Image (spheres, grey):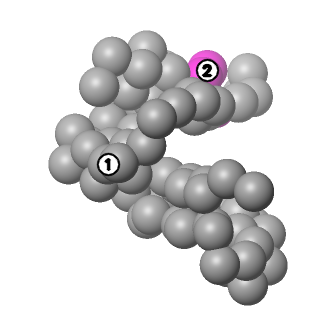
Amino acid sequence: GHDVTVLDRFSGEKEKLLTAWTKFPKFTAVRGDICDVNAVEQACKNREWVFHFAGLSGIQQSIENPISSVTQNCVGTTV
């Protein structure tokens, strides 16, 4: 198996879901934000491949807080 590192802010129920994975020795969770260059560098350190699935989902979030949505979904991708 491969080493897997997840970068996440652990908002909402995600922390409970990710906690279940910590029993696997090749799994590492890094608490951080996709817009934080240092957190992204830490999560990607010594990794051959990076798969980016970060982003805010849901139309309501985008309507209620468009700046945060653009920051997370667009700016975070460029980090």
> Picture coordinates of residue 65 (x, y %)?
50, 29
Q: CA distance from mark 1 to mark 2?
A: 35 Å
Choose top left, top right, bottom left or bottom right for residue 19.
bottom right
Q: Is residue 28 above or below residue 67?
A: below
> Picture coordinates of residue 23 (x, y %)?
73, 84
Main SS of residues in magenta: helix
User: Badge 2, how many Cα within 10 Å: few under 14, some, many 20+?
Assistant: few
Horizontally, is 6 left or right of 37 in the view? right
Q: Pointer 1 and pointer 2: residues touching (CB < 8 Å)?
A: no
Choose top left, top right, bottom left or bottom right for residue 32.
bottom left
Q: What is the secondary structure assignment of the residue under circle 2?
A: helix
Horizontally, is 26 left or right of 68 in the view? right
Residue at the image point whose x is 75% and y is 28% from the top: 58
Residue 67 visible, this angle: no
Circle on res. 4? none
Q: Nearer the viewer, mark 1 or mark 2?
A: 1
Q: Amino acid at mark 2?
A: Ile
Q: Earlier in the sequence, mark 1 or mark 2?
A: 1
> Picture coordinates of residue 57 (x, y %)?
70, 30
Q: Which residue is mark 2?
A: 63
Query: Which residues, given as a range, are shown in magenta?
Result: 61-65
Q: Residue 4 or 72: which is nearer the viewer?
A: 4
Circle on res. 45? 1
Q: Is residue 15 above or below residue 55?
A: below
Taking the magenta stretch, the answer to whether it contains residue 64 is: yes
Q: Amino acid at mark 1?
A: Lys
